[in-house]
Image: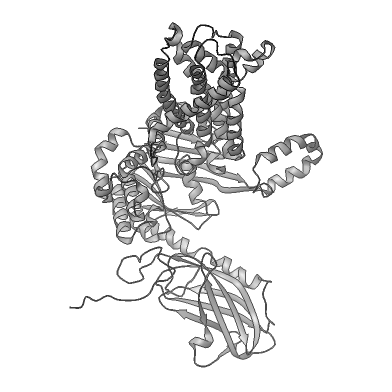
Amino acid sequence: MHDLIIEAGRTERQYWRDLWRYRELFLFLAWRDLLVRYRQTVIGVAWSLLRPLLTMLILTMVFGKLGKMPSGGVPYALLVFCGILPWQFFASAIAESGNSLVTNSQLISKVYFPRLLIPAGSLVTALADFLISLGLLAVLMFWYRWIPPIQIVTLPLFVLLASAASFGAGAWIAALMVAYRDFRFIVPFVVQFGLYVSPVGFLSGVVPAEYRLFFSLNPIVGVIDGFRWCVLGGEHLIYWPGLIASVLVTASILVTGIRYFRRTERTFADII
Amino acid sequence: MSDAINVENLGKKYVISHQRAKGEGLRHVIEDAVRAPLRLARFRRRQTRKISEEFWALRGVSFSIEHGEAVGIVGRNGAGKSTLLKLLSRITEPTTGQIRYRGRVASLLEVGTGFHAELTGRENISLNAAILGMTRANVARKFDEIVAFSEVEKFLDTPVKRYSSGMYVRLAFGVAAHLEPDILLVDEVLAVGDAAFQQKCLGKMGSVVQEGRTVLFVSHNMAAISSLCTRALLFESGRLRSSGAPDSVIKEYLATGRDRARVAVSARTDRQGSGRIRFTNVLILNDCGETTETVRSGADISIAFEYSICGADRLDNAVVQIKFFGALGQPLFACLSRAARLESLTLVAGFRLVCNIPRLPLVPGAYTFTIWCTIGENLEDYVSEAGQLFVTDGDYFGTGKLPPNQVGDFLVAHSWTADP
């Protein structure tokens, strides 16, 4: 027999157990988002290749050819692509998980499950796109005859870091969006703006040394630098104080994001 | 047997903020933060305003339900039925009290929750089942049964956005009907689809009850409650008013509200007219002559007007009209004494005027009515929305079946013959 007690102000206790109990629903939500993502599009999943490819061409033109930024001895296109991959993952993850609660408002007002599953499901779609474009990176490396260094085996760690940052920020935005639809306008702006304050089209090395640590407070800086270190190696050394700063910022975003989400979650159905 | 559901002192408070109703935006939060230093000075005023904005949708509700009981929940709109279901299904958190379950709970507050228009019927079955809490193994086992029940075999691989609304509802209910929880919470889901499908749903509900599952069922369909349920709870203004055998609770429910109507007309000050006659009361009488506000479709009803005459014993050449409006305020029909009678009316002090409506042709819903009286060219009394009338499902055609729902406002007496 399943016993369940719901008490005013004490629904907390069940939560983590419920997350596990509803794991199948999580898979279904992620699966639904994946299925729906490219329905009724002509080129379908090719969009997840086309987007980073076009962005790469433009950024390579602007920063590499016109701006003549230093590339540290690697093809500029490869350098840019290593920045685009984690950036686009982060950008689409926060945009989609941010919107996810509002787009699923019907579900929220009609059935119970731990709401954290919804932004988590959106993260999975962004991750799937990311993995597909990772294949494109492999093709690009082959094209430039680029042999990655040994540290590429640590790449999953940086994917994890990117996921943690995306999930933390996504939880914050999703929960805030329920009460303040203003974030619908803030998020696209942040994403647009973020492309230029993150080292996507250029190397972090071009940032003056005295600002480097401050620059690294952006959690994506650590992720992009890590990516370049893994894939390009050589001169692309990790700036350790920066990476540590990124990890700490990510951890605090994740913890506070989940906390804030949990705290506001109980009122979602009332105000959404 | 032990209790399947035990509810103790359950309450849900909403804070309705009129000032903020349109602006839960970020601007207000920033504004408040900026004004924070000033707040101390205005502390007292804010406090009092907050208190007046509290609203208890449900308060001090306690009851318990045993395993295998089928319990119907009745009450007017706003009585707290939906809030109760929301609390029971954990969609929102109670402000006070406790709910204790023994057994797996599934709630069905709407058919097709989480259906995605872009997905096919097959995909939606899996998704919807997962949302309602069915395991994957269970879905696989029940899949064929669900498809057979909902009669959509041919369209399984078509996106549901191309479905007709009937197909959509059938598929959605098909999934829901094959949940096998110990405790099932259901909200008005039978109010969808055509009559045949409603009958099928009722049948399915009946068999769920027969299997010994615990069912909690919110409905305005009194016929369904009295045939399916073993007990009923009546809610009024957020409180549990009574609990007992379905038929007696339904009777009580249908009788409530008669006091309100009595107070209303004589206390109205926003009336028009010269006032030689004043309506003091308007009563709706059912076919047994009892005063009520709630009648069934197809019932013979009467409307009795009580009035006082100023400065005379009788008034000749009076014309009285009662006009009915639907839930959206649309005029539906009027009973006009001048049109329905050959001779003019004479109102005598101490008498009452009665308008008989045989076989009420209104579909279930809430209606309001406006009354007026003229003598000659002169408007004597006019009371807009003088009272309300609630119509519930009834056997209009005398066939033992309910008339079709949600097709227009009226029922029309008719017959069918199959001619060679």
- Image check: B261 left or right of A152? right
- Image check: B199 left or right of B263? left
Tell me the residue at 47%/18% (across/down). Answer: A159
Examine the rendered structure and indicate whether residue A209 appears above or below residue B233.
Answer: above
The mark total stands at 0
**Is A232 in front, or is A258?**
A232
Examine the rendered structure and indicate whether residue B265 appears above or below residue A257.
Answer: below
- The answer to which image quadrant residue A61 occupies is top right
* Viewer can see residue B180: no
Examine the rendered structure and indicate whether residue A146 appears above or below residue A35.
Answer: above
Tell me the residue at 37%/61% (across/down). Answer: B223
Tell me the residue at 59%/22% (across/down). Answer: A66
- The x, y position of residue B11, in whole percent, is 55, 44
**Is B325 in front, or is B162?**
B162
- The answer to which image quadrant residue B280 occupies is bottom right
Find the residue positioned furthest to the left.
Answer: B420
Q: How is the image coloured?
A: one colour
* Viewer can see residue A119: yes
Find the residue positioned furthest to the front.
Answer: A66
- The x, y position of residue B230, in whole percent, is 35, 52
- The x, y position of residue B284, in whole percent, is 50, 73
- The x, y position of residue B350, in whole percent, is 60, 84
**Image quadrant occupied by the C terminus of chain B:** bottom left
**Is B355 in front, or is B409?**
B409
**Image quadrant occupied by the N terminus of chain B:** top left
Examine the rendered structure and indicate whether residue B242 appears above or below residue A212.
Answer: below
